[in-house]
Image: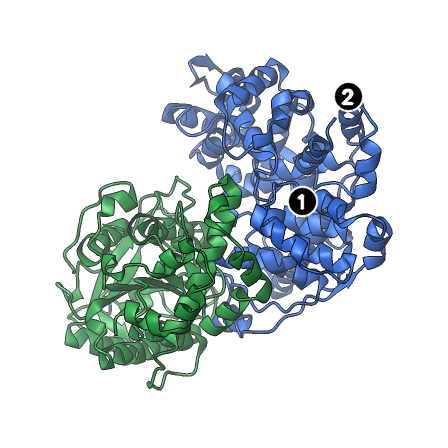
Chain colours: A blue, B green
Amino acid sequence: MKTKHIQHLYFRAGFGLDYTTLEQLRKQSKTTIISNLFEASRNVEPLEIDLSGFESYFNSGFKKPETEEDKAKQKELQKSSREKTVEFNALWIDRLTSSDAILAEKMTLFWANVFVCRDNAIYHMQRYNNMLRRFALGNFGEFVKAMAREASMSKYLNNRQNVKASPNENFARELMELFTLGVGNYSEADIKAAARAFTGWSFKRDGTFHLRKKQHDFGEKTFFGQTGIFNGDDIIDIILQQKQCARFICDKIYRYFVNPEPDAQHIEALTNQFYKNYDIKALMFYLFNSDWFYDQKNIGSKIKSPIELLIGIQKTVPITFQKKKQLLYLQKVMGQVLLYPPNVAGWKGDKNWIDSNTLMLRLKLPAILLNNAVINVDEKGTLEDDFEAYYASKNNKQRFIKTTIHWAVFEKEYINVSQQDLKNTLIIAKIDPDTDALLSRLKFEDQKNYCIQLMSIPEYQLC
Amino acid sequence: MKRRDFLKQSSLASSLFFVPSFISAFQKVNSTTLSHKKLVVIQLAGGNDGLNTIVPFTNDIYYQNRPEISLQNQDLIKATSDLGFHKNLGPLKQLYDKGYLTVINNVGYPNPNRSHFRSTDIWQTASASNEFLSSGWLGRYLDEYVKKPYGGIEIDDSLSLILKGETLNGIATKNPAILNRNMQTAYFKKVLNTQSDAHLSEHNLGYLYQTMIEAQSSAKYIFETSKTYKSKQDYPNNPFAKQLKTTAEFINSNLSSSVYYVAMGGFDTHAGQINRQSKLLDMYASSIETFVKDLEANDTFKDTLILTFSEFGRRLKQNAGQGTDHGAANNVFLIGKNLKTPGFYNESPNLVDLDSNGDLKYTVDFRSIYATILNSWLAVNDETILNKSFNKLSFI
């Protein structure tokens, strides 16, 4: 396997490779490399933070807080939940940076932007996140059925309010429009029927699924031309029968893992593979074994998401953030905060990551993280903030991101590596000849500086 | 002084010597293609309570639903036989008296969404409530007609959806000096100054270089131009006023940017609304007053239209915390010198016929307002930008 191809595989299936690992892999066959990639993701640890403080609340019966004391307690829990969400966000980034099950983690990140969900109750959201992780390389049909049963999703798309007497169509609509078929591939009547099939799907306080039989519509429904006493699972099964469902997902897979510019022929090849049994692992195996995956036009064609950029830097030079809030702040100003998607359609990605403001920030990010460069971008207040809080962060502050930089790790890895090899390790896109000429003219006092400079050229924004 | 003459005299010209031709082409943009009309869009972020802003003071239903937070005669400035301004909106009432204000009641859209984020997206992208667009209406205006990032400016440090186009984006800055400093680092300069035109066609890489070049040039242009005018007005001391002051400096320095976006935060008044909203409306009105004065002093008010909206209004019925919860339809303000229909554009809110949540129903689609502004003010094809035809109104 060509070195560039190994790198390409690992940039897409993960977040790139370090020099030593790349050297080792170069000696192996394509078959070995790919099967080891999957082998490493066979078992995935759930991602968990300490939520014991919430146990008593989520394991008691539902009751509306009546007394002032109860209300105060609930407020306290909500605040704590928000703080824990920030902690979970940091832990997730840490996991993405350090996990060996890199393919499973990358897939989890991908699915989080397909089955998009947002919930301030971390007790439920942690469950949701691990459900994504559990099915990331599993069976797609089972995946959709599990997702539809999650408390966070039920809240996010109002399935909780979906009752026989007055069906709420929100979940049914997004299930088809954004999760499985794509806009225009179903009728309004299909949505109405599906909504009825999901009535009464709810959850217990601890987040486990619960069917409220009294609220479920046990009547006959007609969906995609089939008639029966369908429940939610039946609806999902009928959706899976539509080849369009496989095509819709494969289109997303192609744009995310191969090239943001779709190629109808290759997407159709993926679709035929996926439609056989909706086995995600088999689909990815097929993809990474396809010759066209390694075509020159696909290599370095993707604009890194802010998370891919952040993690790429940290994989080369490990960084500890002294304040979790600052890690969140960086995600905010770059336009991608994990666990906080903008809406149910998720992040659009590719060119949408880039505008004048975010690009300048992204180009400066290596210097901000590794060279103590100042960052003076104020984050936006949120819409629920009061006036003071909204503007609190808007004071033209000169910020330093407080990090502990583990240069020793970098030096151990790259001290004896030539500048040319360092460049080839960090950058997969073809470097613009003028920029390349400039790089070779500049004098760098040491490997550290050269690394920061390499990370600061536009080509580093691509993978 | 014409922009082009100004450019020749500015320090930009001296550096032209070192930059490749595509950058100099960018810097010699022909300003005559841009409309000289300006649009300033202000979002009262969080959902301003319209019913306590423009008060239906003869309506018993209003008082019945808001026993603790309704506004009485002494809290109002009456404008018509049934509508009055919140007493802290004195400056706005003065604009109304001069014929510089149009209030459009009951503005909204079908199937209103009550999430701040989603409804903000709907207003900013001009989408229907069940479609998810990734570009804003002002962004698409830049795409189609302006074709330059500095054509639209958000007074903040990061760009909102409203100014993101399909092919290009506006730029965000609340301090052009800082923005310029951030974009003119020695290293970026080196990278850009060694660029020849040849390699910019590369798919995504070309896009990155192009964005970088335009960002730098835009930052420099905004900084160099805006510093030629410093406001002499005494603005109130609050961050929203500061955003407006910056906007005035952009407009009065004859920056060719035509659309501006400012968000003022704090309107999510679920509790203790009376005091909180009073303060906010006072800040809003006094800042607007100074802003209009600033424009008038420079004869730019006649070419500026100010649109104020909120992502939604609030529920008619107050809640238990002396506040109000998320609602639907709301009033929209238009401020300008050339209004066709000054005063109240349409009927007062109907408090009898509410939707199933107990919220006001809309009678004017917000996209009709956008279509009118695009068509009659910015003089462009509104359908191209809104992807659909909406009824035009006659306020401008």
User: In the displayed structure, does residue B182 sit left or right of residue A319?
Assistant: left
Q: For mark 1, what is the residue?
A: A427
Q: Are marks 2 and 1 on the same chain?
A: yes
Residue situated in front as seen by the camera: B322 or A274: A274
Residue situated in front as seen by the camera: A389 or A215: A389
Indicate the amino acid at tag 2: Thr
Against A97, is B310 above or below?
below
* Location of residue A37 in the rendering, given as x and y in whole percent from the top left corner: 77, 30
Gap in Å between the C-alphas at discs 2 and 1? 25 Å
Q: For mark 2, what is the residue?
A: A31
Number of the front mark, 2 or 1? 1
* Location of residue A211 in the rendering, given as x and y in whole percent from the top left corner: 59, 31
Residue B196 numbered mark, or none: none
Against B55, is A365 above or below?
above
Indicate the amino acid at tag 1: Ile
Residue drawn where x is 46% and y is 31% of the image: A177
Mark 2 Cα shell of 10 Å, populated few (<14), some (14-19), many (≥20): few
User: In the displayed structure, does residue B55 sit left or right of residue A295?
Assistant: left
Mark 1 Cα shell of 10 Å, populated few (<14), some (14-19), many (≥20): many
Count of numbered circles on the image: 2
Q: Looking at the rendering, which quadrant does residue B72 occupy? A: bottom left
Q: Looking at the rendering, which quadrant does residue B58 occupy? A: bottom left
* Location of residue A205 in the rendering, given as x and y in whole percent from the top left corner: 65, 43
